[in-house]
Image (tube, helix red, strand yellow):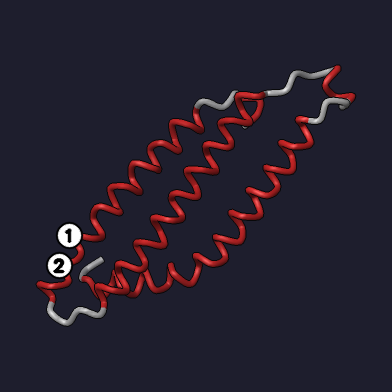
Amino acid sequence: MKDMNDYVRAYSQLALLLNAYDRQLERITDLYNQARERDRRLLRIERLYRRPHLANWEIMSEILDVMHALNKVFRQGTSVVQNMAQLSAESERMQFWHEHFLPLEAQEKGLRARLLIVGQRMSPAEQ
């Protein structure tokens, strides 16, 4: 991106997608919770033939937690960029960017790294 106006345009488009992303993330979380609850039931014939992958349930739960945290960071980022867009002077925008957006960007990178590490812990049969 060439200047701050490019970021403002990009993040205003991202803001439009976040509501759909929220709905899909909640849908996936609900499906996960339903599947996990179904797997916990004691009188399941499948339990006689297979062992539950308890570690993978925990890992998937952690993945969903990270995804929710990332979603929160995305929302904060769009809010920061919208607030930055209201500043008129380029020097004010740059200072605001460094103080408010760059910490969020660092947090996002950390969450993405955590997501990669957690995903690699799943057993290959369950991925």
Residue furthest toward the front? Answer: 42
Pointer 1 local density, CA inside 10 Å: few below 14, some 14–19, many at least 20: few
Circles 2, 1 touching at the beta carbon (< 8 Å): yes
Judge whether 61 appears above or below 2 on screen.
Answer: above
Rendered residue at 52%/36% (across/down): 62
Q: CA distance from mark 2 to mark 1?
A: 6 Å
User: x and y percent of residue 81 in the render?
Assistant: 30, 69
The three-letter code of the residue at mark 2 reads Met
Mark carried by residue 98? 1
Judge whether 61 appears above or below 12 on screen.
Answer: above
Q: Which residue is mark 2?
A: 94
User: x and y percent of residue 34 in the render?
Assistant: 74, 43
Rendered residue at 65%/29% (across/down): 126
The three-letter code of the residue at mark 1 reads His
User: x and y percent of residue 59 in the render?
Assistant: 56, 31
* Relative side of 108 to 85, left or right: right
* Relative side of 106 to 59, left or right: left
Rendered residue at 50%/65% (across/down): 18
* Relative side of 75 to 46, left or right: left
Mark 2 residue element: helix
Pointer 2 local density, CA inside 10 Å: few below 14, some 14–19, many at least 20: some
Rendered residue at 41%/36% (across/down): 114
